[in-house]
């Protein structure tokens, strides 16, 4: 009977531990301190106002463990449209060159930022190996053949290469690669908006067999201006331009898709 009791208690302890791990879920936030649109003009579809866009987000965990891996991101700021054809471009292959971006992309750079990551074994989410990387956003004219949807969508609507660069000691392993991120036309608060979407390949989600979790992203897209045809007229626009908003504030939305395919959305008023 004593052995049976010990076995039952042991089973209960294991089940409680598993339940505790299972209850740990990601926390997604778009902190107000990480976002901003400048100038704060409303703009209109007929007369877009060039703006600088600052955006960022954080990912935490309810049990203070390393967050779960995210495989897709969708980023949009209400009433901000993009005009990629108003800026110089380079190809995705040039933006994805090993070690260093091709010089042909220098004039196509539209923004910069940082990503803070935590890596560790998939069966031990208490492991938190820091990996900090530099971001470069590049206006590209072609997509990534490994993600066929990016090829057709960038050809149709334009997009960015999200370039990631890091080396030891900032990160245990060197990383120099790009993600192809097309723009999609959506409605946010009922207003025409450009949404940036990109997927994370296995090489970045699970480098060296580890799980890599993004915990904070900060980036700024410059107020780059150029000419584009708007409603039949050639106008000065920004890479990002304000074309309207519902009220006095502007909603910034980030959608996260985890490895199970589940979607989570975080929003903030700017």
Image (spheres, rainbow, N blue to C red):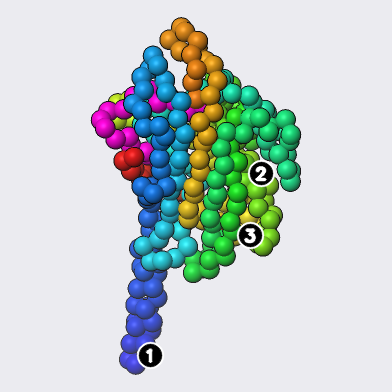
- 242 part of magenta stretch: yes
Labels 2 & 3 near each other (Cβ < 8 A): no
- 73 part of magenta stretch: no
N-term-proximal mark, 2 vs 1: 1
N-term-proximal mark, 1 vs 3: 1
- Badge 3 is on which residue? 170
Asked if 183 appears above or below 177 in the picture, the reply is: above
Residues at marks 2 and 3, CA–CA distance in whole angstroms: 16 Å
- Badge 1 is on which residue? 3
The magenta region covers 239-256
Q: Residue at x 52, y 34 (%)?
A: 222
Camera-nearest residue between 125 and 231 = 231
Camera-nearest residue between 127 and 258 = 127
Asked if 267 appears above or below 152 in the picture, the reply is: below
Labels 2 & 1 near each other (Cβ < 8 A): no
Tell us which disc is closer to us: 2 or 1: 2
Residues at marks 2 and 1, CA–CA distance in whole angstroms: 56 Å
**Residue 257 visible to the viewer:** no
- Badge 2 is on which residue? 177
Q: Position of residue 244 (x, y in %)?
A: 34, 24
Within 10 Å of disc 1 (Cα), the crowding (few <14, some 14-19, many 20+) is few
Q: Quadrant of the C terminus?
A: top left
N-term-proximal mark, 2 vs 3: 3
Q: Residue at x 47, y 34 (%)?
A: 52
């Amino acid at each position: 009977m004593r052995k049976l009791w010990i076995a039952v208690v042991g089973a209960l302890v294991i089940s409680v531990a598993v339940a505790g791990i299972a209850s740990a879920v990601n926390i997604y936030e778009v902190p107000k301190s990480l976002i901003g649109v400048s100038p704060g003009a409303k703009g209109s579809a007929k007369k877009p106002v060039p703006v600088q866009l600052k955006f960022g987000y954080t990912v935490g965990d309810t049990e203070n463990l390393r967050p779960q891996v995210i495989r897709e991101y969708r980023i949009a700021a209400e009433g901000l449209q993009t005009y990629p054809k108003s800026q110089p471009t380079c190809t995705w292959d040039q933006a994805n060159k090993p070690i260093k971006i091709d010089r042909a992309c220098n004039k196509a750079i539209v923004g910069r930022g940082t990503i803070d990551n935590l890596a560790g074994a998939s069966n031990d989410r208490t492991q938190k190996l820091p990996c900090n990387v530099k971001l470069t956003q590049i206006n590209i004219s072609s997509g990534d053949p490994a993600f066929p949807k990016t090829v057709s969508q960038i050809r149709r609507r334009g997009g960015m290469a999200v370039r990631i660069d890091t080396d030891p000691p900032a990160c245990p392993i060197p990383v120099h690669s790009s993600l192809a991120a097309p723009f999609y036309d959506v409605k946010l608060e009922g207003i025409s908006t450009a949404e940036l979407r990109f997927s994370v390949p296995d090489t970045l989600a699970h480098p060296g067999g580890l799980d890599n979790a993004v915990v904070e992203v900060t980036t700024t897209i410059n107020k780059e201006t150029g000419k584009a045809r708007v409603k039949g007229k050639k106008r000065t626009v920004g890479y990002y331009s304000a074309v309207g908003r519902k009220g006095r504030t502007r909603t910034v939305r980030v959608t996260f898709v985890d490895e199970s395919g589940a979607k989570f959305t975080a929003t903030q008023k700017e």
